[in-house]
Image (cartoon, grey):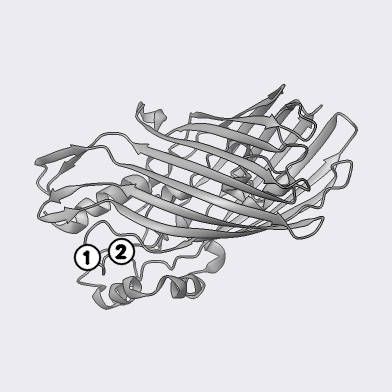
Amino acid sequence: MKRQPIRLAAFILLTSFICNYSFGQADINVVTTAVPFLRINNDARGGGMGETGIALSPDAYSHFWNAAKTPFIKDKFSGIGVSYTPWLSDLGLNDVYLASLTGFYKLGDDEKSALSAGLRYFSLGSIQFTKDDGTNLQQYRPREFQFDVAYSRKLSTKLSMGVALRYINSDLAYGNLGGVDYKTGSAVAGDITLYHHGLDASGKGLNWGVTLSNLGSKIGYTSDNQNKDYIPANLGVGLAYTTVFDESNKMTFGLDLNKLLVPATPISSNTGVQTYDDSVNAVNLSGYRNSSVISSWFKSFSDGQNQLSEVQASLGVEYVYDDQFMLRAGYFYEDKNKGDRQYFTAGIGLKYSFMGLNFAYIIPSNSGITRNPLSNTMRFSILFDLEEGGGTATAATPK
């Protein structure tokens, strides 16, 4: 068996929600990476708002969106969040899912800094590996996880910064398959984040944030050091404006823009279309794979692609009544030549005592390979406030 078919099969399965290949269109050139599960949103609040979250009011899930927000969590000294996201449940699968756990703890009496940590686990169920002729090789249960810790601190009364360190483990295949020895891939990465908290005493105002995430090493699944892949380094910018109607009613509008800091795979100079045939693109692919990680971040802005087409946009709105009930809606947009994911979302949030519940739903759209793996799927996250400065637990729904 050739190396590439096994590897591509695993990556196509993992990246179906990002890549959305459409081989019938010659002009598609999707930016692909390893471990794309790092980009799956695991927060149902942001999921209900079109996948926004970089600048929304902070809570325990700020660790995954923008760790710099954590010191601005209001009236809460520590908290945890748990989420579960079924994957491809629209196809009847029940063993493919993303689960996460996160928590934060503020430091010092002034609570100007905080530590946070997060664990994200992605199970891909049971997969049958085969040869090119269809002969079964073995069954395997691919799985991936990340564990990270972050430190964040207020730089002023309105500005904060965060840094995170992340370990990534990707176990897609193991053992000898078709003459190739596969192993578990691992990588180390970090985040640098910034957040500006612009809300006044009434809760009205504009927040903004900037994130540089997954800045780290390449990852490989064989002993071939020349055959490693980029992880999804990303530049994100977010805005969130909150307007207050009265003591019981307010509304937040959010916008996130994200761009992968990974260059697109080189296209063939012969045909002008992308190809995955190494014999055609040997020189270009060699240069692509041998580029250093740092240089790849800059090349992502000069890879011959329309840079605006590589920006993913998330729009969201949240209505809050009496800080206890939330209605959410949103829209996610991706250029048709970069994956063509375009869908609406809806969500609700409920707050009771020290616990907050958030639910999100993606309204089904498109079909076939462009259909979102979360279509017809209800995902949820739970937030718990452990204590606050006064010693009394309060609800864990963002203010």
Q: Position of residue 24 (x, y in %)?
A: 33, 55
- Residue tagged 2: 228
Task: Tell me if I can see residue 19 in this picture.
Answer: no
Residue displayed at 76% across by 52% down: 207
Considering depth in this image, is 345 or 105 the residue closer to the camera? 105
Please tell me in which quadrant of the rendered image residue 319 appears. top right
- Determine the secondary structure under disc 2: loop
State whether residue 146 is above or below residue 193: above
Viewed as shown, does residue 312 lie left or right of 265? right
The amino acid type, in three-letter code, at marker 2 is: Lys
Q: Position of residue 201 (x, y in %)?
A: 89, 43
Q: Which mark is residue 224?
A: 1
Q: Position of residue 71 (x, y in %)?
A: 71, 48
* CB atoms of marks 2 and 1 within 8 Å: yes
- Could you classify mark 1 by the number of other residues whose Cα lies within 10 Å: few (under 14), some (14-19), or many (20 or more)? few
Considering depth in this image, is 134 or 86 the residue closer to the camera? 86
Viewed as shown, does residue 312 lie left or right of 263? right
Viewed as shown, does residue 125 lie left or right of 46? left
Residue displayed at 9% across by 41% down: 135
Task: Tell me if I can see residue 10 in this picture.
Answer: yes
